[in-house]
């Protein structure tokens, strides 16, 4: 049977409406990814959660009655999706420093390899943070995706985690958080107090979310430039000058971690000696400058080795984390798979 003109127009308008809805939902992807990443601690888990959130929203949009904003409705869906993921997880994500004592740099210490689900993962900064905004809000947002802070969040129960992110990072009023979580304002305030108490033990004494002055982006960029120059020269004296005395180094998926300038130097001159001759490409990761490390390839050029996150206090490097699953991370950061 031939389609009437009215039916044709109706089908076209429905398709246009669906496309417009998809485009509107897509505008929330980045901020939802940041929210889910903080909750889950895994970059790919966050991607999956956001994709499921947008799919559920698209399928159920006709039942959206507009009693809240579209943004609030999407956050409600995302929260439920993440809570489902957290409820099915066997263990919280960690960092090597949270699993045991520091290693001896002289001994063989790369035997203990844990699965990717065990670790807090890195994420490109521009995948989880919005563009230019108020400088104070930007500083809080950057601090809230630092590796140490995201790792500290994983020690909170799911509800406390969500409350702290919504109230202190995203600056939602307690009434809106209570409505999103189907609870009372008193319950939200109580959860926030408990979350703050836990983070006082777990979170670093740094910025934004923790109250200390944040290092400026200019200071961090300068520190990165000097560190990369010293590392490419493999100048141990110059590197030592850039490290804080209690700096730590770790390399997920290995459970090993090192503490102190002397131990880090011993490692780099011993088991890590093959890093000499590396080339580095700057990247922005977890709200802080970092770099992609390429090791010398015997066949010529340099091959991917790791994504390096440099934690710092604005003056010295306080932590060196190298994520070694190169096939996964280099493509995510849009990096070449070989340097000539």
Image (cartoon, rainbow, N blue to C red):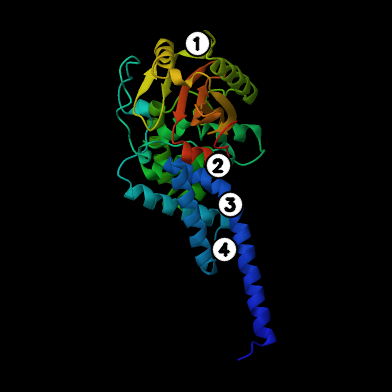
- Quarter of the picture holding the C terminus: top right
Q: Earlier in the sequence, mark 2 or mark 1?
A: 2
Rendered residue at 63%/25% (across/down): 217
Residue 146, position in %: x, y?
50, 31
Marks 2 and 4: which is nearer the front?
A: 2
**Which secondary structure lies at badge 2?**
helix
- What residue does disc 2 label? 128
Circle number at residue 236 = 1
Q: What is the C-alpha distance between the residues marked 4 and 3?
A: 17 Å
Residue 139, position in %: x, y?
59, 31
Depth check, front residue: 159 or 235: 235
Q: Earlier in the sequence, mark 3 or mark 2?
A: 3
**Which secondary structure lies at badge 3?**
loop
User: Can you tell which quarter of the image residue 191 is in?
Assistant: top left
Q: What is the C-alpha distance between the residues marked 1 and 3?
A: 45 Å
Q: Is residue 207 visible?
A: yes
Categorize mark 4 by other alpha carbons within 10 Å: few (<14), some (14-19), many (20+): few
Does residue 173 appear left or right of residue 323 in this picture?
Answer: right
- What residue does disc 4 label? 66
- What residue does disc 3 label? 28
Residue 307, position in %: x, y?
50, 31
User: Can you tell which quarter of the image residue 127 is in?
Assistant: top right
Of all residues, the one furthest to the bottom in this rendering is 1
Categorize mark 1 by other alpha carbons within 10 Å: few (<14), some (14-19), many (20+): some
Marks 1 and 4: which is nearer the front?
A: 1
Residue contact at pointers 3 and 2, CB within 8 angstroms: no
Q: Earlier in the sequence, mark 1 or mark 3?
A: 3
Residue contact at pointers 1 and 3, CB within 8 angstroms: no
């Amino acid at each position: 049977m031939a389609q009437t003109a009215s039916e044709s127009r109706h089908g076209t308008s429905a398709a246009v409406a669906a496309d417009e809805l998809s485009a509107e939902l897509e505008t929330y992807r980045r901020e939802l990814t940041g929210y889910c990443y903080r909750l889950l601690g895994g970059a790919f888990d966050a991607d999956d959660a956001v994709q499921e959130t947008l799919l559920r929203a698209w399928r159920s949009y006709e039942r959206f009655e507009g009693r809240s904003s579209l943004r609030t409705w999407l956050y409600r869906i995302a929260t439920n999706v993440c809570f489902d993921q957290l409820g099915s997880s066997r263990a919280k994500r960690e960092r090597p420093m949270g699993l045991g004592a520091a290693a001896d740099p002289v001994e063989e210490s790369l035997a203990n390899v844990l699965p990717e689900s065990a670790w807090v993962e890195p994420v490109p900064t521009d995948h989880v943070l919005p563009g230019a905004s108020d400088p104070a809000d930007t500083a809080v947002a950057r601090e809230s995706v630092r590796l140490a802070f995201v790792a500290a969040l994983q020690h909170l129960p799911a509800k406390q985690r969500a409350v702290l992110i919504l109230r202190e990072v995203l600056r939602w009023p307690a009434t809106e958080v209570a409505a999103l979580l189907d609870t009372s304002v008193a319950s939200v305030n109580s959860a926030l107090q408990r979350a703050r108490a836990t983070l006082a033990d777990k979170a670093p004494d740094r910025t934004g979310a923790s109250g200390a002055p944040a290092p400026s982006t200019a200071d961090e960029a300068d520190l990165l430039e000097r560190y990369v120059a010293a590392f490419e020269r493999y100048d141990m004296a110059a590197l030592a000058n850039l490290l804080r005395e209690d700096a730590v180094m770790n390399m997920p998926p290995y459970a090993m971690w090192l503490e102190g300038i002397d131990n880090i130097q011993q490692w780099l001159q011993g088991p890590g000696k093959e890093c000499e001759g590396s080339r580095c490409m700057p990247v922005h990761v977890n709200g802080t400058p970092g770099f992609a490390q390429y090791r010398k390839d015997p066949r010529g050029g340099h091959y991917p080795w790791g994504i390096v996150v440099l934690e710092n206090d604005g003056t010295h490097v306080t932590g060196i984390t190298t994520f070694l699953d190169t096939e996964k991370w280099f493509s995510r950061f849009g990096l070449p798979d070989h340097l000539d």
